[in-house]
Amino acid sequence: MKKIYIILALLATVFPVCSWAMEEVDDNLIEAELTPAVQLTVSGSQVRVTGAAGKTLEIYDLAGVRVGTIKIDSEDKTLHLNLQRGCYFLKVGKVVRKVSIR
């Protein structure tokens, strides 16, 4: 029995248990800190996309059918969407917004 206590004591000194060492790192938080926030602003049928250079804007209707994709080539881009009136989902990277085109 003494051997078990001695082994446990040695392991505790070699591998200390710290709450900060045991925390899991959230990859989403790291990615959010490293990349600028993507913002989507809608005015009528125009969409302004900021912070999404090199990403793709995907447009989905309410049924989930992709109705268009647009490559974003600059940090601040204003697009005129040639869509019928209605509700759509806009997706850039992990950012999704529900918008109404009037």
Image (cartoon, rainbow, N blue to C red):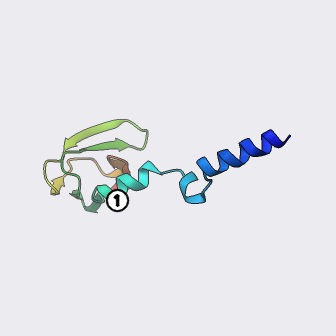
Image quadrant assignment for residue 63: top left
Query: Is 39 rendered above or below residue 69?
Result: below
Residue highlighted by disc 1? 33
Q: Residue at x 83, y 43 (%)?
A: 2
* Crowding at mark 1 (Cα within 10 Å: few <14, some 14-19, many 20+): few
**Observer-nearest of 66 and 74:** 74
Q: Is residue 99 visible to the viewer in this orientation of the structure?
A: no
Task: Give the residue type that dot 1 points to.
Answer: Glu
On the image, the x and y values in percent for residue 73 come to 13, 48
Is there any visible trace of residue 49 in the rendered image?
Answer: yes
Q: Residue furthest top?
A: 65
Q: Quadrant of the C terminus?
A: bottom left
- Pick out the residue farthest to the left: 74
Examine the rendered structure and indicate whether residue 3 appears above or below residue 33: above
Residue 91 x, y percent position in the rendering: 33, 47
| Tag 1 secondary structure | helix
Residue drawn at 37 percent across, 48 percent down: 94
Task: Give the quarter of the figure containing the N terminus.
Answer: top right
Q: Position of 52 compared to 65: left or right?
A: left
Q: Nearer the viewer, residue 83 or 2?
A: 2
| Tag count | 1
For image coordinates 30% across by 60% down, the residue present is: 37
The residue under the point 24% across, 39% down is 69
Q: Position of residue 27 (x, y in %)?
A: 43, 49
**In the rendering, at what x and y percent does residue 60 appear?**
35, 42
Q: Quadrant of residue 8?
A: top right
